[in-house]
Amino acid sequence: MSRSLYVIVCLLVLSGCFRTRSSNGGGDKSVLLTERPVRAADIELPAGYKAEAIATGFTFPTDVAFDDQGQVYVIEAGYSYGEEFLEPKLIRTSPDGNKTTIATGELNGPWTGITYHDGSFYIAEGGQKNGGKILRITPEGNIATIVQDLPTYGDHHTNGPVIGPDGKLYFATGTATNSGVVGPDNYNMGWLKRRSDFHDIPCQDITLTGQNFTSQKPETGETVTTGPYLPYGTAATPQQVIPGAVPCSGAVFRADLDGSNMELLAWGFRNPFGLTFAPDGQLYITENGFDDRGSRPVWGTGDYLWQVQTGQWYGWPDFAGGLAFNGERFGAPGEDDPKPVLAAHPATPPKPTASLGVHSSSNGLDFSTSVAFGYTGQAFIAQFGDMAPSVGKVLAPVGFKVVRVNVADGTVADFATNKGKKNAPASALKTGGLERPVAVKFSPDGTALYIIDFGIMRNTDHGSIPQKGTGVLWKVTRTAP
């Protein structure tokens, strides 16, 4: 989603008809997408700001970038939960909304993030079929793989990338599982059918408590026992040592721009989805917290904004937001509270910079650097959202908006929401505002905030169903101080 994209929602069942409506002017293109009009007037912003829809009709867009001339580029993921495989694309978008495909990738998505640096695009390829990669793409569309074989076949993917003040390439890997244990939920997500031996990989040697978890194989109903960091159906033993390796699961890495000299920066994250550098040069990430699912369900943990400290361990799979699983918290209703699976912890995790909404799926982020735009030095975060009281994750709908965070004190405030019922997608509200914000990025001069809206994703008894062609690129600017 990535829990950034793993969202079980209760949306209306929408038809697939498409037609174009006339423009309302001011760049606000109103297009009917599966019975959801795209209408900037339905987005609520602080006084003195306006939104406009720059381009519509994207299929599973996940990020935006700008070249040296300020031209706007969007990537389409090429994969979505619901086991929807398509070709990922790099698309140049003109101010009038026209789109030109620059490069097309392999069926190994999702493409989750993009940055532009020194004449090249750098893209994170999720690796659902052939392992995670970092790609370098020229403006002419030539693709080169500079990092490969990242262990991201599972729930979460390869994320980032971003270029640091040191000129290095930074990127992240998510974990294979929700909470360290392979189970039927991973089968339902699709990847366990393809890779029955896959599991999480620690970044250094760890010792297990010997705790095991039982489940029923979806194909046969057979009861199997599985330990953490082990293949499905493999039991753990007390004091068993799991060897560490690099690359590993749930970690942030740094490498040279050609992909060489890769090194581990920090680990112990569940899904470090968004990466960016603050104006002071500090690296920040968003982390998608635990779900109430699988063999080791965890209830009520938030998403988090972290300042990344080199060499630090951040707590997954035995902590959430710096709080330990001690058998007295984070238990889902009717379930036992989760207990530690590690006999010893690599370190004491720090506290997050900010705690975000439970299961808000807080994803792409960027910092305001422009006095003209305002909120200088604050982080802006896209929240994909969850409407899931009926599936036992949150007590009320959460997300479907863009928030801003004062990193000095951790306070979180809404920035862009849907009018009316704020924490709901436009399709459920039958309005034309935000559906699934997944990324935000400021223009090179800092005066405009671009929002990538993934589009409609609905739920059935068989899982998530994403709607093709419903993604939107929004632009927010300040009209008055």
Image (tube, rainbow, N blue to C red):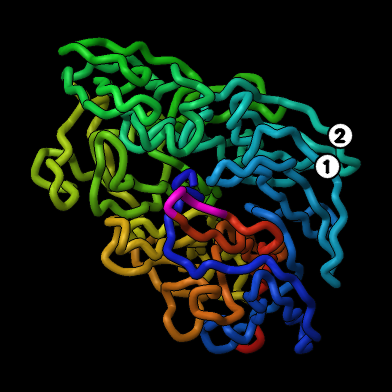
**Residue occupying the point 77% across, 75% down:** 19
- Frontmost residue, 148 versus 375: 148
Report the mark closest to the observer, 1 or 2: 1
Q: Is residue 420 above or below residue 404?
A: below
Q: Answer whether residue 98 is magenta in the image.
A: no
Q: Can residue 163 be seen from the camera position used here? A: no
Q: Tell which circle, 1 or 2, labels the residue nearer the N-terminal end.
A: 1
Residue 245, horizontal then vertical, whole percent? 44, 15
**Residue 89, can we see it?**
yes
Q: Which residue is more in the foreground, 340 or 309?
A: 340
- Dot 2 falls on a residue whose secondary structure is loop
Question: Is disc 2 surrounded by few (<14), some (14 to 19) or many (20+) residues within 10 Å?
Answer: few
Hey, what amino acid is under mark 1? Answer: Ala
Q: The magenta stretch spans which residues?
A: 461-465
- Give the SS element for disc 1: strand
* Residue at 71% from the left image edge and 25% from the top image edge: 146
Residue 479: x percent and y percent? 66, 86
Determine the image quadrant of residue 119: top right
The residue to which callout 2 is attached is 142
Give residue 474's mark.
none
Residue 339: image location, x then y, percent: 15, 34
- State yes or no: discs 1 and 2 in contact (Cβ < 8 Å): yes
Residue lying furthest right in this view? 140
Which amino acid lies under the numbered mark 2 shown in the image of this protein? Asn
Q: Where residue 209 sits in the image (x, y, percent)?
A: 16, 20
Mark 1 highlights which residue? 103
Could you tell me which residue is drawn at 83 percent across and 55 percent down?
92
Q: CA distance from mark 1 to mark 2?
A: 7 Å
Drawn side of residue 331 relative to residue 95, left or right? left
